[in-house]
């Protein structure tokens, strides 16, 4: 986990900016990385002043929404989802 782009003492996966202002930070999660301990990291990041965006596997979105609600950060977090499909 490379730590080259710091935002207020944290190292999100992506920092989204516009005209020199940070508008959002993003974490890309995998099935294995979605845990109650990781939800604590999300809570810490959500309190830093920028919108937190989470990208999670499609089938994990309900679990992530549950964790976000339990942490009380639903108003500070956007949850998107992804699906990887490989056709050979």
Image (cartoon, rainbow, N blue to C red):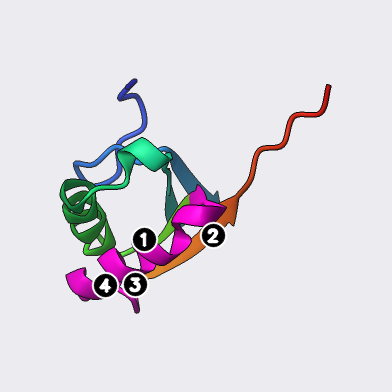
**x and y, in percent, of residue 75 in the image:** 34, 79
Relative to 41, residue 80 above or below: below
At 36% from the left and 60% from the top, the residue drawn is 64
On residue 76, the disc is: 3
Residue at image mark 1:
64
Are the two marked residues, 4 and 3, in contact with CB atoms closer than 8 angstroms?
yes
* Residue lying at the far right of the rendered structure: 88
**x and y, in percent, of residue 74 in the image:** 33, 75
Q: What's the magenta region?
A: 56-76
Residue at image mark 4:
73
Dot 3: element? loop
Please indicate whether residue 13 sits to the left or right of residue 10 in the image.
right
Q: Main secondary structure of the magenta part?
A: helix
On residue 80, the disc is: 2
Q: Could you tell me how far apart the alpha carbons at marks 2 and 1 are, in whole angstroms?
A: 10 Å
**x and y, in percent, of residue 82 in the image:** 60, 49
Dot 4: element? loop
Q: Disc 4 or disc 1, which is closer to the eye?
A: 1
Q: Could you tell me how far apart the alpha carbons at marks 4 and 3 are, in whole angstroms?
A: 5 Å
Of the numbered discs 4 and 1, the one sitting upstream in the chain is 1
Q: Quadrant of the C terminus?
A: top right
- Hey, which quadrant is residue 72 in on the image? bottom left
Q: Disc 2 or disc 1, which is closer to the eye?
A: 1
Name the foreground residue: 72 vs 64: 64
Relative to 1, residue 20 above or below: below
């Amino acid at each position: 986990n490379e730590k080259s782009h710091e935002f207020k003492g944290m190292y999100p996966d992506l920092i989204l900016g516009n005209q020199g202002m940070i508008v959002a930070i993003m974490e890309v999660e995998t099935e294995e990385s979605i845990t109650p301990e990781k939800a604590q990291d999300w809570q810490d990041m959500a309190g830093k002043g920028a919108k937190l965006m989470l990208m999670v596997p499609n089938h994990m979105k309900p679990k992530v929404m549950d964790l976000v609600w339990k942490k009380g950060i639903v108003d500070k977090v956007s949850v998107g989802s992804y699906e990887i499909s490989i056709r050979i």
